[in-house]
Structure formats: structure tokens, C-alpha cells
Amino acid sequence: MASKQQMKPEVPNESDDFTIIDLDDPKESNDTEVPMFERHVEAMLEEIDRMEEVEMEDIAEGPFLDIDNGDKKNPLAVVEYIDDLYKFYRKAECTGCVPPNYMAQQHDINEKMRAILIDWLIEVHYKFELMEETLYLTVNVIDRFLTVHQVVRKKLQLVGITAMLLACKYEEVSVPVVEDLILISDKAYSRKEVLDMEKLMINTLQFNLSSPTPYVFMRRFLKAAQSNKKLELLSFFMIELCLVEYEMLKFPPSLLAAAAIFTAQCTIGGLKHWSKTCEWYTNYKEEQLVDCSRMMVTFHQKAGTGKLTGVQRKYCTSKYGYAAKTEPATFLLEAKS
């Protein structure tokens, strides 16, 4: 469909062979009659407006909302491709998933050490004021690397800061310098050690940093949930709690994102709520989410009670809407049969 706003044509050189039609010239136009091309354009625009009205009527009567309808004139929303993009993400997410028991292959580290590392990295991420997607990619890189490479415990923190460095290079505009990462790790490693680990990790992952993380699905699913800021922050609180928990690796990123939003909606509303629109765009029914959601509620209950309190402290700030202070949706646990 042609755009209603056309690009300004380039001004040709004087030497070019061309003819200019002056629409103000009485020889070329008739003041008493609307030019034919103008009538065609007006008719076309009227038809476009009429079609958009019909589309809105169809949406209102359907079982789910067209969440992209308001973005059709926004080129950054890529409405023409968005459904295909997320179909691709759903197919590709399995490539970024790791075996949920991969830690059994590690001889010197365990899931508790992983939890300590990621909880610390969440605080580092917050301190450096990095983009949200950087955190999710950092965790993804760590797990994928540990799946295929043996690491001794004294090098685990090195793996963590190097994974964050790689994620920053992929996601950020301004990347923290190596010296900052060394400083934040209490100078436990040298610059050479970080760069050597970076080379090892990126080659082990075969330069593949494009795996869909839960963040990719969160943005789309929150739009389907017609979220406000409160729901958004609480949803991210839920899913960041899951980043620390090794047992949550058994769930694919898309399900984690959907379950986080479902749990947040239940927490705010005090009852189960999963609309047809959410079901349509996530491809998950409520019954597919409840097991994961109940685990999130238990994490919410114990948040801030143990030694790993990075997520709790982060979401107890005004910047994150004091989301961590919300009462857990314990009724979801009571409903378990």
C-alpha cells in the first residue's frame, strides 16, 4: 500500500533533459475542475479509511484483539513482519535452551554456585545501568558455555564477567571497559585472563549470540496483556527471580515469559486471569502455565529471606516500582490439586 506521505523528489540538474508540468499554468489545469489524479487519490484515501473502519469492527467482534492495529503507520513496529518474526523465535528458542541437568557434567561447580554468580551479576548489571536484554543474554551465554565446557570454581566468576562483556558488545551502545569488570570482581583476574576467556567462550559458542531469550517474548506478550507499568515491572521481577534458579532451565523462554505475566496478573488482581488475546499471541493456555507459575510464587515468597537477595533489593527501589513488596499470589498454591 502506498504511503500517504511521499518523499520529496531530488531537484534535477539544469543539463538534464526533462519537462516540468506547471499545475498552476492555465494551459495545463482547469480551475473549475479537480484534476483527474487528485480525484483518484482522494477516492483511494477514502477507501483506505473505510477499510480501516471495517477492520476495527471485525476486531471488536473477534475473540482476541489485534494488538498491532495501532502501529500500522509506525515503520519501527514492522507490523507486516511481526507475526513471522515471532514464529521464527518460537522455532529458534530451542537452540538457545540447555539441558536442565547439565550441571551434572561439571565436576568442580554446582547449581548453588551458579545461583550465587547470577545473583551477583544482576547487581552488577544494575550498577552499570545496562539494558534489560543484556542481562538475559548474559545468563544465556553462561549456561550455554557451561553446558559444553568444564570450569573450575575459581574461574566461574571470570566466566560471568566475560559473558556480560560479550552480551554488552552485542546489545549495548556504550560497552563497559575490561578494567571496570576487573575492578567489580575485586581484581581477581587480569586483563589477559578476561580476553583469553572471551576468545574461548565466543569460539565455543561459534559466535552465536542470537538465541531468543525470555526478554524477546516478554515485550510481545506484555503488549498482548495490554500491560501498564505496574504489571510490566512485576512481570520482570518474577522472571528475574527465575534467572537465579537452576531448576527453571526446564522451561523454554517463551513459557517463562508467559508464566511471569500470568503470575503478575494473578498477583495484582487476586484471581486467575488469562485472556483470549494473551492465549492467542503466546500460544499457551492457562493450564500450561500453572506449574511454572506456582514455582514463581514460591520464589516470590522466599525472595529476600536467604543470602541471594540481588533481585529483591533491585525491585525494592522506586525505579522498579517497589514491585518486590507486592504480596505473593499464594492462592495459586492453594488451588493445586
Image: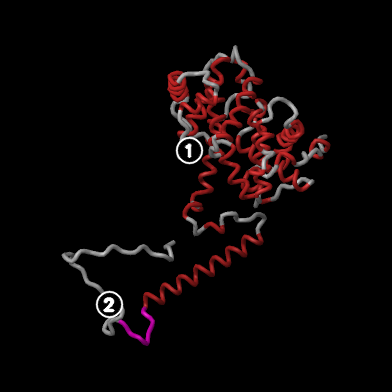
The residue to which callout 1 is attached is 172
The residue to which callout 2 is attached is 22
In terms of secondary structure, where does tag 1 sit? Answer: loop
- Across and down, in percent, residue 322 comes to 70, 42
Q: Residue at image x 46%, y 35%?
A: 175
Sequence-earlier tag: 1 or 2: 2
Left or right position of 329 against 31 = right
**Amino acid type, callout 2:** Asp
Q: Nearer the viewer, residue 18 or 12?
A: 12
Left or right position of 140 against 306 = left
Q: Can residue 6 be seen in the rendering of this structure?
A: yes
Q: Which residues are magenta?
A: 29-35
- Rendered-image quadrant of the N terminus: bottom left
**Amino acid type, callout 1:** Glu
- Rendered-image quadrant of the C terminus: top right
- Across and down, in percent, residue 57 comes to 62, 65
Q: Can residue 259 be seen in the rendering of this structure?
A: no
Is residue 175 on the magenta stretch? no
Residue farthest toward the left in the current orientation of the protein: 15
Magenta stretch, main secondary structure, is loop
Q: Nearer the viewer, residue 174 or 104?
A: 174
In terms of secondary structure, where does tag 2 sit? Answer: loop
Q: Nearer the viewer, residue 334 or 244?
A: 244
Q: Quadrant of residue 214?
A: top right
Q: Residue at image x 51%, y 44%?
A: 85
Residue farthest toward the top in the current orientation of the protein: 107
Q: Residue at image x 56%, y 13%?
A: 152
- Across and down, in percent, residue 81 comes to 49, 49
Q: CA distance from mark 1 to mark 2?
A: 51 Å
Q: How is the image coloured?
A: secondary structure
Q: Is residue 239 above or below residue 142?
A: below
Q: Residue at image x 67%, y 26%?
A: 247
